[in-house]
Amino acid sequence: MNLFDKIGGRPTLINISKRFYDKVYNHSWLGLYFKNTKQSVIESQQVDFMTGALGGPRIYGGRMPFDAHIHLNINHDLFDLRQQLLLEAFKEENAPQILVDRWLKIEEAFRGQIIKRNISECQKRYFTDEILDFTDPNQHKVS
Ligand code: HEM
């Protein structure tokens, strides 16, 4: 049995992705990057992508991470923040440790393709595309 089947297959990935993107869309900074993206669409793309990456059927037909994020100015802080929300989602869904380890390893492997040093590394993917670049709205607030 491969890892995909071992961890409960597609239903497990659907539950984690839903939990995760609920957090992402509600986040005051990370959520801004998703203003042009429908949550149900990104959830199913994420599930399809991780299905193939975890040894299940190769059904993902979208852009690969470099091309999918070329219009997004993403720095390490934002990438780390996203990972924190992912860890919370794993915990709340009681994800098996073997899945957590593999999923984080896969995402970490794409970090260098997704992170930008500055906005000059961003490009529109098509003519009417929008380059998205936001600073953390809370970074200057005293908590
Ligand atoms: C801070 C880090 C990240 C941010 C802010 C982010 C944001 C986004 C956004 C806004 C989209 C939708 C683009 C659109 O609507 O056209 C997207 C697509 C996607 N992202 Fe991410 N992402 C991040 C990291 C990752 C990582 C680490 C992975 C997995 C390796 C990933 C996998 C995907 C996939 C598979 C898609 C769908 C691509 C497509 O078909 O166009 N993302 N991401």
Image (cartoon, rainbow, N blue to C red):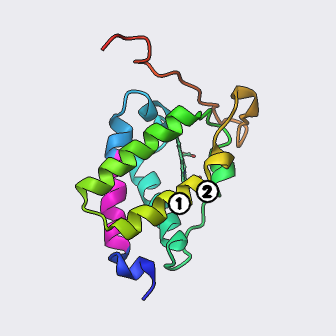
Residue 19 visible, this angle: no
Q: SS at mark 1?
A: helix
In this view of the protein, which residue sits in the foreground, 142 or 49? 142
Percent of width and height locating residue 14: 34, 64
* Furthest-bottom residue in this view: 1
Q: Is residue 114 left or right of residue 34?
A: right
**Separation (CA) of disc 2 from disc 1:** 6 Å
Residue 75 visible, this angle: yes
Determine which residue is flagged by label 1. Answer: 105
Percent of width and height locating residue 33: 50, 34
Q: SS at mark 2?
A: helix
Determine which residue is flagged by label 2. Answer: 109
Q: Is residue 90 above or below residue 58?
A: above
Q: Is residue 65 above or below residue 50?
A: above
Q: Is mark 2 within 8 Å of ligand 1?
A: yes
Q: Is residue 42 left or right of residue 142?
A: right
Give the magenta range. 10-21
Q: Is residue 142 above or below residue 9?
A: above
Point out which mark residue 51 bears: none
Whether pointer 2 and pointer 1 mark residues with C-beta atoms closer than 8 Å, the reply is yes
Q: Is residue 117 above or below residue 65?
A: above
In this view of the protein, which residue sits in the foreground, 2 or 126? 2
Q: Residue at x 71, y 42 (%)?
A: 126
In this view of the protein, which residue sits in the foreground, 43 or 100? 100
Q: Which quadrant does the C terminus fall into? A: top left
